[in-house]
Image: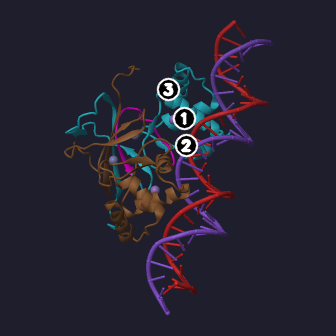
Chain colours: A cyan, B brown, C red, D purple
Amino acid sequence: MEHLKFNIEKLRASGLRPTRQRLAICKILFNRKETFHFTIDQLKKIAEKNIKKKISLATLYNTVHAFEKKGYLKEISLKGNKTFFDTNTKNHHHFYDEETSQLADIKNENISISNLPKIPNGKKIKEIEITIKVANNNQKQN
Amino acid sequence: MEHLKFNIEKLRASGLRPTRQRLAICKILFNRKETFHFTIDQLKKIAEKNIKKKISLATLYNTVHAFEKKGYLKEISLKGNKTFFDTNTKNHHHFYDEETSQLADIKNENISISNLPKIPNGKKIKEIEITIKVANNNQKQN
DNA sequence: AAGTTACTTTATAATGATTCTAAACTATAA
DNA sequence: TTATAGTTTAGAATCATTATAAAGTAACTT
Ligand SMILES: [Mn+2]
Ligand SMILES: [Mn+2]
Ligand SMILES: [Zn+2]
Ligand SMILES: [Zn+2]
């Protein structure tokens, strides 16, 4: 478990105590090769499957928000009732399949916007988000 | 009130009875020059100010969703607890000021994306949404 | 016009996600 | 080891939204 030490350090470095719960959540969220997009509900299901001792729902919320505040997670803008989080905290863009509620990062670093409009007076750009909504190709065309 | 006849016809044409409540909501939403972006809560406050007889919260939800289904309103993707609606139902893009929760349409029709990534296999694009998050220029830089 | 019916509105209850609370627990420093 | 601040937890509270079902109304039929 080389990951374990890393996660403990990561937590310590940000002033968060490396508790059993937080380490278990770190393992779910950060010990993977691909970006992970999730809702609290999905995280809860994964935690239930993979962790012997139950983590309370309040702790899942607390921890995810603590990680968000420390910059390890990012909240994603999507319509719908549930909040999505993203382990990729860089400014990036998404494919979103509304049928399956699956998010995927757009890998292409070259994607950009042409003919960017002028920003309203007195305002400055904080972030630009592009969401490409996709559907199955073999769908009835409506 | 030339608008009134128009709204009555609009409702009739879509199989919705032109009730007092619906006409009052139409007036708030559609009888303006600019695109209108709103939450149910904001609509409720406007209705309370402008309409003598109270419209129930349930009717606001019912009506907004009926209008959405008929294609007169569009739901907007934003993070946060509340759902935003938009009287501009065309595919278009937004400025979003998170400090004030204000949405504004990007007027520029020429805005476009360059180096569009390839779509995942078996999927097709349904819609592309660009959100430019803005903040006040004179803000502490964090 | 009166009767009929389907549609609509409404108050209120139910739901579901999220946040709050305050007591029990625990990591860490003294 | 003790003290302390940080953490976890169950459960309550909150807030947006949706469901329910009874009363009201628009529009059609006679
Ligand atoms: Mn948050
Ligand atoms: Mn809707
Ligand atoms: Zn992402
Ligand atoms: Zn708009």
Whole-number angstrom distance, CA of label 2 to CA of label 1: 8 Å
| Disc 2 and disc 1 in contact, CB within 8 angstroms | yes
Tell me the subunit letter for badge 1: A
How crowded is the residue under tag 1: few (<14 C-alpha within 10 Å), some, or many (20+)?
many
CA separation in Å, label 3 and label 2: 18 Å
Chain of the residue displaying label 3: A
Question: On residue A64, which mark appears?
Answer: 1
Q: Amino acid at mark 1?
A: Val
Question: Could you tell me which secondary element the residue under label 2 belongs to?
Answer: helix
Q: What residue would you read off at disc 2?
A: A40
Asked whether the residues under the numbered discs 3 and 2 touch, taking CB atoms below 8 Å apart as contact, a structural biologist would say no
Determine whether the beta carbon of the residue marked 1 sits less than 8 angstroms from the nearest atom of ligand 1.
yes
Q: Which residue is mark 3?
A: A70
Chain containing mark 2: A
From this view, report whether residue A40 is shown above or below residue C1: above
**A101 over B111 or under it: above or below:** below
